[in-house]
Image (cartoon, rainbow, N blue to C red):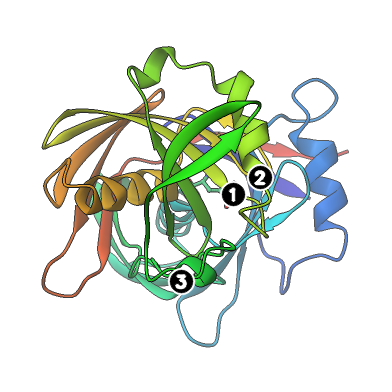
Amino acid sequence: MEFTKMNGLGNDFIVWFGHQDLPSDASELAVRLCDRHFGIGADGLVYILPSEKADFCMRIINSDGSEAEQCGNAIRCAAKYVYDRKHINREQITIETLGAGVQQVELTVENGLVRMVKVDMGEPILEGLKIPTTLDLSSVINEPIEAGGSGFRFTAVSMGNPHCVIYVEDAPSFDLEAWGSKLECHPLFPKKTNVEFATVRSRKHIDMRVWERGAGPTLACGTGACATLVASVLNGYSDRHAIVSLKGGDLDIEWSEDDNHIYMTGPAEIVYEGRLF
Ligand SMILES: N[C@H](CCC[C@H](N)C(=O)O)C(=O)O
């Protein structure tokens, strides 16, 4: 079976097109193929499938074999794939995901290839029990959390998948390995969580590093960037439109006052095609 290796700001995926539904062995395949020594190497598998409600459906499997409800970098890759490979010839398309339903996607095309992708990531979910966390609060803002004998303050947001945003002195130099997995599996998060460590540089610029649920440290996280922007607005740290800088590059994130939706704009890249033996 042919696959395409893609990434969004270095958050990399093995992309499959042509299946009618998610294969029953997708979880095992993810663990085997995402291995960076014995497999292809990636943060996850992305399946682009038919949809009855949208132009396509996207399913995302993390490298540990768990399925995520949503993935910002992957949806940009899926949109680029279907346009560049001529499965669609419109610059406004729709992609359905488990976590956010039918999402509007706007493509910027140059010389017949997608250069930038703007995705409507839907409305953030702020109610504690719906994120989900174990906290029965209307929103989880700057709450205490203990991990590894240390205390932090966190803000929780769901973009269809759960996120725990913690503000630190300098995100780029923060020790992700020391705290990431402890917080990912913290009992406050019944479905585990993605963990973002953020430093606000200005009202329009936030540095962020991410430890992803089911994948560990990655170079970028689209839903994490959205969650970080929402958390920064809720804490009064940033405007509703800002650049979130990740290790792999920048995403433009806007939380619209008009429709309460989050808009994420960023690139996607096709690196190579391959065939499994
Ligand atoms: N690991 C995430 C899914 C991928 C999200 C991230 N890669 C993104 O770009 O949004 C989770 O289990 O929720």
Q: Amino acid at mark 2?
A: His
Element type where label 2 sits in the image: loop
Query: Could you tell which of marks 1 and 2 lies nearer the N-terminus?
Result: 2
Give the spatial CA distance, label 1 vs label 3: 17 Å
> At which x and y percent is residue 138?
38, 71
Mark 2 surroundings: few (<14), some (14-19) or many (≥20) residues within 10 A:
some
Give the spatial CA distance, label 1 vs label 2: 8 Å
Q: Look at mark 1 in the image and give the residue it sits on.
A: 193
Task: Give the numbered dot on residue 185.
Answer: none
Left or right: 263 in relation to 257: right
Name the one closer to the observer, 131 or 262.
131
Q: Is residue 239 above or below residue 169?
A: below
Residue ID at (23%, 47%):
235
Q: Amino acid at mark 3?
A: Ala
> At which x and y percent is residue 198?
35, 31
Residue ID at (39%, 17%):
172
> At which x and y percent is residue 143?
42, 48
Q: Mark 1 or mark 3: which is in front? A: 1
- Label 2 near label 1: C-beta < 8 Å? yes
